[in-house]
Structures are given as C-alpha cells and as structure tokens.
C-alpha cells in the first residue's frame, strides 16, 4: 500500500485501499481504517510528540491524513482537568474531566472528527462536504469547511436547538432542517452522498471521520503522563467515539508509547434514547432501534451505526452502560458546573449522571482513576435549563436598594 493505512472490513478482513466508502459491500459491515503499526513501533517517540504544537495533528502518524498534508488548524488538545470537588461529591478519589466543551473551533469533540474527514475529502478531490447531524457535527463541518474553502451542506432534524442552527448558518453553510428524526436524516444523506458524490463526513467518509475520535484517547493517555486510566465514561450517540477511544489506546500500546493496561469502558446514554445501553443491559449483541424522546438531542440516535462495536467494546473491557432521565441530565449539568466550573451541554451531563449511577452500583470504585469524557458546551443548549435557575429581581443602582434586597431575600450581610 502506498499509504501507511487503508480501509479494512472487520468482519471478512478484506483490505480495500482508500476510498470514500463506509461499508463492506459483501458483509454490509462498517469499514475501519487499519494502520501499519509494526512499521511505527519505536519510530514514534513520546519526546517527538511532546515537541509538537498542542493540537491533534501531533499524532499525525496515527491519523488517516494524506501523505504530505500539512493541516494547521489547531483542533483538540483540550484540558484534562483534575476534578477533586466533583470527585468528593461522587465519592471518588481520583477523577478527571476531559473538557471538550472548549474544543476549537466549534466547541465540541466533533471538531476532531471533522478535521480528519476534511483532510481526506480534499485528497479524494471532493469539493462539496456535509453531514447528517444532531447539531454539533453540523457546527464543526460548517466552521471548518468555511476555512477550507469547501461548499457545505448540513442536514439536521428540524427539532434541534436553535443555537445549533445559528452556529452552522453563520459560517455560510447550507443548513437543511428535515422534518423527521436523525435516523431519517441519515437515510436521506446516504442517498444524497450517492446521488451527488459529495463527501458526507459521517456517511461515505465515516471510517476516516471516526478515526478523529481516537485523539480523545491519545490526549488522555499523554496528559496522564503516558498512562492509561482504569475507567473512562463516554457518551454514545452513533457509538463511534467509545469504540475509537479504545482503538486509540490499543494503538498507543501497539506502537510502544504506553504500557498495556486493562481499561474499563463505560457507555452513557439518555433513557429517552438508549439503544446501546439497553443492549448492554439485556445482553444483546446488536442494539434494537428506538424512537428518541429526550432533551439530549446530541445523543438522540435511535439506530446507531457503530452500536454493535460499542456493545462489544464495553462488554469485552469489563465495563457497563447506563442511562439517565431528563431530570438527572439537568442535575448533572448543574453538578459539574457548580463543582468544577465546567458548563457542559446535555451530552456531558448524561456522562455525569451515568457516572453517579455506576458508582452507586459499585462498578466504578473510589480508588481507581476515572476519566469523564465531557464532549460539548452548555452555551449551545441553554433552552434545556429554561425555568430551572432562579434570578434576582432587577434592583435600583443604589446601595440602599441593594441592602433592601439582601434583607428581602434573607442573605446575612458579611462585612470585612
Ligand atoms: C456526537 C456526540 C457524541 C457521541 O458521539 P458518537 O461517536 O456518535 O457516539 C457525544 N457527545 C456530543 C456532544 C456529541 O455531539
Ligand atoms: Zn467484509
């Protein structure tokens, strides 16, 4: 092979070169990018990586970007925050938050997958790109296509958060609201990709797109001092992220950058759309499609493309999956914000709520090192909180008026 990676079918093992296709046409199974890891062993060092700029391109040898490409958009390398106050509340000793609420350029982990997919789209000569999205992916495609000078068409369920529509349209992307569910949007996009030969990042470019998710795993390992955690809790929509974090950890071990260690993978969903967590709990290999009904729009995929792999990764790692109600999601948003100063969207809150459940079930233990994957920014889903927060009434700009307010709300005055 001319490049150090190519598509292969996980089911029949066929090698398929590099092309904008997502499925093995013999097995109808999703394709995955396989790297020549043997060739990299010992050749890629921690020091080499550490000397590079702090963005996801520092792992370029392990990303399916074209040879000679020189991407310069600083995507990724988000903070891994120690979270002692949240740990305290949850009854853990060592807890970290991987904070992709501040991933650039569009404030969710979807910037990672899009960065990789657009490099590939360019190499395939595709001039028009797009996606089927629950919101964040549309934002990321729109922003990065604008900068790359590509035309963008993003398809979303009409019911997504207004902020997410605005955060795509501002970049000049064609935003197409579809009156239907995400799964209907996705089916339409498969037809569009075939008909127009566009590069739809999570449809016909999906194997390359999914590789971008590995960088969450690469960064967590590097930021822990080139060590793997004991547990990681990951939100699941299509199920690509959780599977690719595992692939990322495995690749770091294979090339000799970290010591092997068992990591338990925990999947998190909203109860109103929980095909993957239900499959894990019921012992099914393939998730059964559901009709989503939850405030967590970004995870509302009823028929997850990588659901089977997600189930497999979770179960084979000794992990588990759980789901939480809308009320628990809102409580999770507040808890993370109040303890660690991180304002996440509903998807990140699902992770907080699920972690709490898993700890109560004894599946995550206090003395282990646990990482929560916080994947999106709360400013995009403020409507979820409407009516929940208390605001003080407006006060005249006079000290006496402020003191009257304090007396009225019963706050004792502290003076220095
Ligand atoms: C898309 C998304 C996920 C889940 O990613 P999948 O790879 O589809 O499972 C998690 N969090 C947020 C904020 C997302 O936008
Ligand atoms: Zn096959």
Image (cartoon, grey):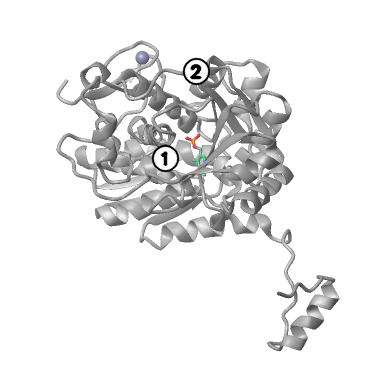
**Nearer to us in this view, 91 or 160:** 91
- Residue 200 in the image: state x and y as whole percent: 35, 40
Q: Quick one: quadrant of the C terminus?
A: bottom right
Q: Quick one: quadrant of the N terminus?
A: top left
Q: Secondary structure at mark 2?
A: loop
Q: Secondary structure at mark 1?
A: helix
Q: Judge left or right: residue 277 versus residue 210.
A: right
**Nearer to us in this view, 131 or 247:** 247
The image's mark for residue 149 is none
Q: Alpha-carbon neighbours of circle 1 within 10 Å: few (<14), some, or many (≥20)?
A: many
Q: Is residue 222 above or below residue 168?
A: above
Q: Please identify the residue farthest to the top as the structure is shown.
A: 12
- Residue 206 in the image: state x and y as whole percent: 37, 33
Q: Residue at x 41, y 17 (%)?
A: 260
The image's mark for residue 262 is 2
Q: Judge left or right: residue 410 versus residue 98.
A: right
Q: Residue at x 35, y 29 (%)?
A: 207
Q: Is residue 351 above or below residue 260?
A: below
Q: Alpha-carbon neighbours of circle 2 within 10 Å: few (<14), some, or many (≥20)?
A: few
Which residue, given by chain and number where applicable, does mark 1 sit on? 189
Q: Judge left or right: residue 389 versus residue 11.
A: right
> Toward which corner of the image does residue 220 lie, by quadrant?
top left
**Nearer to us in this view, 400 or 317:** 400
């Amino acid at each position: 092979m001319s490049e150090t990676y190519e598509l292969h079918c996980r089911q029949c093992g066929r090698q398929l070169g590099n092309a904008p296709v997502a499925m093995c046409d013999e097995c109808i199974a999703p394709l995955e990018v396989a790297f020549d890891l043997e060739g990299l062993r010992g050749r890629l060092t921690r020091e080499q990586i550490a000397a590079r700029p702090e963005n996801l391109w520092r792992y370029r040898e392990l990303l399916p970007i074209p040879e000679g490409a020189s991407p310069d958009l600083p995507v990724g390398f988000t903070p891994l925050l120690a979270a002692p106050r949240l740990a305290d509340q949850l009854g853990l000793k060592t807890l970290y938050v991987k904070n992709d609420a501040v991933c650039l350029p569009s404030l969710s982990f979807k910037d990672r997958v899009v960065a990789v997919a657009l490099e590939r789209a360019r190499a395939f000569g595709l001039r028009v790109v797009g996606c089927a999205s629950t919101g964040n992916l549309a934002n990321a495609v729109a922003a990065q296509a604008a900068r790359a000078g590509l035309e963008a068409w993003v398809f979303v369920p009409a019911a997504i958060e207004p902020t997410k529509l605005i955060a795509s349209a501002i970049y000049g992307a064609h935003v197409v609201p579809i009156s239907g569910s995400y799964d209907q949007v996705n089916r339409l996009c498969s037809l569009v990709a075939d008909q127009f030969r566009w590069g739809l990042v999570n449809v016909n470019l999906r194997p390359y797109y999914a590789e971008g998710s590995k960088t969450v795993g690469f960064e967590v390992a590097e930021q822990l001092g080139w060590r793997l955690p004991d547990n990681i809790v990951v939100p699941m929509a299509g199920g690509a992220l959780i599977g690719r974090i595992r692939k990322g950890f495995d690749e770091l071990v294979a090339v000799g950058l970290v010591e092997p260690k068992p990591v338990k993978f925990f999947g998190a969903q909203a109860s109103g759309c929980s095909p993957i967590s239900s499959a894990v709990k019921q012992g099914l290999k393939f998730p059964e499609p559901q009709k989503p009904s939850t405030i967590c729009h970004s995870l509302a995929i009823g028929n997850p493309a990588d659901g089977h792999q997600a189930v497999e990764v979770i179960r084979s790692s000794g992990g588990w999956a759980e789901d939480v109600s809308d009320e628990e999601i809102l409580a999770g948003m507040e808890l993370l914000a109040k303890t660690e100063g991180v304002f996440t969207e509903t998807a990140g809150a699902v992770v907080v709520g699920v972690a709490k459940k898993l700890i109560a079930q004894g599946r995550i233990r206090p003395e282990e090192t646990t990482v929560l994957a916080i994947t999106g920014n709360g400013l995009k889903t403020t409507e979820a909180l409407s009516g929940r927060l208390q605001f003080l009434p407006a006060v005249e700009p006079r000290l006496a008026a402020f003191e009257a307010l304090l007396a009225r709300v019963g706050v004792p005055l502290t003076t220095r």
